[in-house]
Image (cartoon, helix red, strand yellow):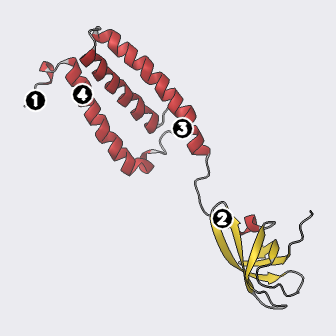
């Protein structure tokens, strides 16, 4: 049986740090289950809490090992530094990541108004193919002429509308 009463304070910090590292690894794999808990309260985010505790125990262990300060002073210093690091991490890493676009998907309505390039010629009353470069990558879609005119290979086209997965395009005429 382990006698936890005989542990020194730096052992407490070290074992807590090991336990928190295991918790972070588990959170990495199962974090989506836990993420819904703190949706309304920004600082009740498991990532923020785990980061604070990890910084606190790591700093406590380092200060206990390499300084001769009192344990209470070390705990206070570690808590203050961890709090500052945690706030910086929350506002400069987590908030921007949360507001960033998380999906690489696109919807067809977002293609309207973009310029593409014909890779398969579009006949008068038929279908060809157009490539559109977006921030998500290159998309090739079936296309037909909006004005019922043929559009040759390698022409630039403007996407007028999208219906049922088909791009309705017309030849692109730049203003300048």
Which label sits in the foreground, 4 or 1?
4
Above or below residue 135? Residue 74 is: above
Please give the residue where the numbered disc 2 appears in the rendered image.
106
In front: label 1 or label 3:
3
Spatial CA span between label 2 and label 4: 47 Å
Badge 2 marks a residue whose secondary structure is loop
Which is more N-terminal, label 1 or label 4? 1
Q: Of helix, strand and loop, which one carries label 4?
A: helix
Query: What residue is shown with label 1?
Result: 2
Q: Which residue is mark 3?
A: 93
Query: Gap in Å between the C-alphas at discs 4 and 3?
Result: 27 Å
Residue 21 falls in image quadrant: top left
Q: Residue furthest left?
A: 1
Mark 2 or mark 3: name the one nearer the start of the chain.
3
Q: CA distance from mark 4 to mark 1?
A: 15 Å
Answer whether residue 98 is visible to the viewer in this image.
yes
Q: For the residues marked 2 and 3, what is the alpha-carbon distance in whole angstroms?
A: 25 Å
Residue 60 on image: x %, y % = 31, 20
Residue at 27 percent across and 35 percent down: it is: 19
| Residue 47 lies in quadrant | top left
| Residue drawn at (81%, 74%) of the image | 157
Query: In the shown orientation, is residue 37 left or right of residue 126?
Result: left
In the rendered image, the vertical position of residue 33 relative to residue 69, given as above or below: below
**Which residue is pictured at 39% across the width and 34% down the height?**
50
Cα gap from disc 2 to disc 1, whole angstroms:
56 Å
How many other residues sit within 10 Å of disc 1, few (<14), some (14-19) or many (≥20)? Answer: few
Mark seen at residue 14: 4
In the image, 43 versus 13, the foreground residue is 13
- Looking at the rendered structure, the secondary structure element under dot 3 is helix
């Amino acid at each position: 049986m382990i006698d936890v009463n005989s542990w020194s304070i730096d052992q407490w910090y070290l074992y807590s740090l090991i336990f928190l590292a295991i918790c972070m690894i588990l959170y990495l794999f199962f974090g989506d289950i836990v993420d819904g808990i703190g949706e309304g309260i920004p600082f009740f985010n498991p990532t923020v809490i785990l980061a604070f505790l990890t910084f606190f125990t790591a700093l406590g262990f380092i200060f206990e090992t390499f300084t001769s300060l009192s344990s209470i002073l070390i705990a206070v210093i570690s808590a203050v530094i961890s709090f500052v690091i945690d706030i910086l991490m929350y506002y400069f890493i987590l908030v921007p990541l949360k507001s960033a676009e998380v999906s690489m998907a696109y919807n067809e309505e977002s293609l309207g108004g973009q310029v593409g390039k014909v890779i398969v010629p579009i006949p008068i009353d038929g279908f060809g193919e157009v490539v559109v470069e977006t921030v998500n990558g290159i998309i090739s879609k079936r296309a037909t002429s909006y004005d019922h005119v043929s559009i040759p290979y390698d022409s630039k086209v403007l996407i007028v509308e999208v219906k049922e997965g088909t791009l309705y395009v017309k030849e692109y005429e730049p203003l300048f």
